[in-house]
Image: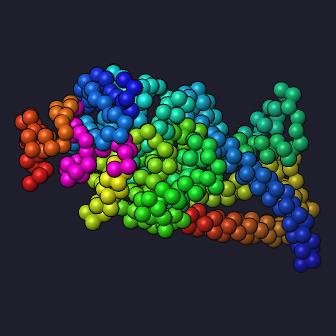
Amino acid sequence: MPDSVISMDKVNKWFGALHALRDINFRVSAGEVVVVAGPSGSGKSTMCRTINRLETIDSGTIRVNGETLPAEGRELAKLRSEVAMVFQQFNLFSHLSILDNVTLGPIKVLRQSGAEACKEALGFLDRVGIGDQAHKFPAQLSGGQQQRAAIARALAMRPKAILFDEPTSALDPEMVNEVLEVMTQLAKEGMTMLVVTHEMGFARRVAHRVIFMDAGQIVEEAPPEAFFTNPKTDRARDFLSKILM
Amino acid sequence: MNELMGVISTLLRAFVTTLELTFLSAILSLVVGILAAAMRVSPVPPLRWAVSVYVRLVRNTPLTIVFFITVFGLPQVGVNFSFFSFALLALTLYTATFVAETVRAGIQAIPIGQIEAARSIGLTFTQVLAYVVLPQAVRSVVPPLASTFIALFKNSSIASAFGVAEAISVMTNMVNVHSTIVLSIMGATAAIYVALALLFGRAFTWLERKALIAR
């Protein structure tokens, strides 16, 4: 399936006795924005993390651009560099300036020159609205600014897709929107995105498709309008009634 | 009084050797210790085991015995250095185990999320260590490393028993020659040690502050 940037086939994962992912099958096509929703503990973050092999899987196949995810080593590192990730806790490198956070990957992985990486990084930082913070350190920025820096760091890798693992869950409420705005902009520009989030407003406005997970399974998969107005399963109805109150 | 001044100027010259021994083995043990710590967290099991055996064995052996084995054992297998080089080797092998354990503690204190972020942008294991993990780990362990290196400074005195004319060895000679001012000679030696160690402490505090600002 050449069109799929990300595909999972019959993926299973156990944490000891807990069956964390059950026969997960899905695809993300180029330019698509897919939101993964579901109650906590449903496996949505775990699923997101397996795509970058931050979690291993016990059976099944994960493909990125049609290539099966390799085990540890250089090949894995290369494939990882093509799928960027944005984390709940931002995870900026605290000993590096914002600019150096963004240029580290381009210089060391993409082998760009320092000057070139720097120029591009400043462009990405401007795009997420924190160009003026380039020379500060992560601890000097607000949570919203840190997360936008993390998005700039992801963009600088020129990825084929970006995975967002609950990007706004650790933010103070007044900072959620500044991050969602950047993500909405990326979606409009055609970036392929897989977004694990509780932000249902974002899902409704921006997603092309919503995947609803519960107890390690994909329970429902639908366009946002259909999912929000007419969920097919009881579990999705129940989840939506709690979260949309 | 003139007698003591003469002794002190001889002593100060001997302290130059002590300082050479200390600085050279500090730098070498920092390099060896950081490498060992990196190997200790590597995904290659034999590397981990090798370092683990080295650290456990050497760290728990009295330094004097490490000196014995280096100075008398190595020539038996055809390795011949100067006494100074043997002392350098013994101090480095011994101190590096402490550096390795300290740096390993620093590595373990790094939030796992930073390592995941580093891997997710496609850095290899070695790159993650070199650009993300070790720079932060070493910074965070500057204070305990200061203690390790001050201990090294004083431990270098064991070289006096193995043919190196450093401060303690010269002090012993002076005590034998100037038997009427034994306590003064020892007091003066101790005072120089303390003064230099305090100076190192100062330098490390400065370094610690610099390491912190960069965060």
Residue A195 is one of the magenta-drawn residues: yes
Give the image quarter of residue A231. top left
Q: Is residue A56 visible?
A: no
User: What residue do we see at 64% from left, 55% from top?
Assistant: A115
* Residue A91 or residue A107, whichever sits in front: A107
The extreme front residue here reads: A189
The region drawn magenta spans A188-216
User: What residue do we see at 63% from left, 69% from top?
Assistant: B206
- Quarter the C terminus of chain A occupies: bottom left
User: What residue do we see at 63% from left, 39% from top?
Assistant: B36
Give the image quarter of residue B207. bottom right
* Residue B20 or residue A72, whichever sits in front: A72
- Quarter the N terminus of chain A occupies: top left
Residue A125 is one of the magenta-drawn residues: no
**Residue B23: x and y, percent?**
76, 55
In the rendered view, does B211 fall on the left or right side of A133?
right
The colouring scheme, among rainbow, by chain, secondary structure or one colour, is: rainbow
**Residue A168: x and y, percent?**
30, 54
The number of numbered discs placed on residues in the rendered structure image is 0
* Residue B154 or residue A8, whichever sits in front: A8
